[in-house]
Image (cartoon, rainbow, N blue to C red):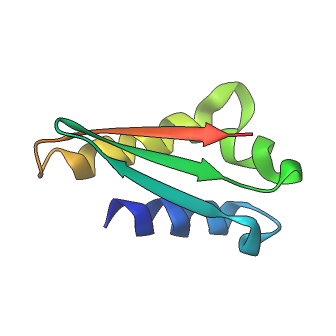
Amino acid sequence: MEKELVEYIARSLVDDPDGVEVNRIDGEKSTILELRVSDNDVGKVIGKHGRIAKAVRTILSASANKSGKRLVLEILD
């Protein structure tokens, strides 16, 4: 569910929605979501001073509280 949420938010923000890729890596206590976007769209996903990235991470942490696992979002260049 979280993977689809990150994809939806990222595709809404970028100019090239086809360039959005989300990879999920499950661990014992945490899950890592790797977000990869086109080179031109990295700034749009991060936002000024990281505000958009922080907002997306806040939404994800609220979503992850139900499962009891820690959720980490990594934005890859």
What is the quadrant of the N terminus in the image?
Answer: bottom left
Identify the residue at image location x=53%, y=38%.
74
Identify the residue at image location x=73%, y=72%.
17
Q: Position of residue 62 (x, y in %)?
A: 25, 46
From the viewer's perspective, is 13 left or right of 29?
Answer: right
- Looking at the rendering, which quadrant does residue 14 occupy? bottom right
From the viewer's perspective, is 32 left or right of 7?
Answer: left
Q: In terms of depth relative to the viewer, which is nearer, 64 or 51?
A: 64
Identify the residue at image location x=72%, y=55%.
37
From the viewer's perspective, is 17 left or right of 24?
Answer: right
Q: In terms of depth relative to the viewer, which is nearer, 37 or 65?
A: 37
Identify the residue at image location x=64%, y=68%.
12
Q: Position of residue 8 (x, y in %)?
A: 53, 69
Of all residues, the one furthest to the right in this rendering is 40
What is the quadrant of the C terminus in the image?
Answer: top right
Of all residues, the one furthest to the bottom in this rendering is 18
Q: Position of residue 32 (x, y in %)?
A: 39, 42
Of all residues, the one furthest to the top in this rendering is 49
Q: In terms of depth relative to the viewer, which is nearer, 11 or 18?
A: 18
From the viewer's perspective, is 69 left or right of 9?
Answer: left
Residue 8, above or below 31: below
Q: Position of residue 48 (x, y in %)?
A: 73, 31
Q: In terms of depth relative to the viewer, which is nearer, 32 or 1?
A: 32
Q: How many marks?
A: 0
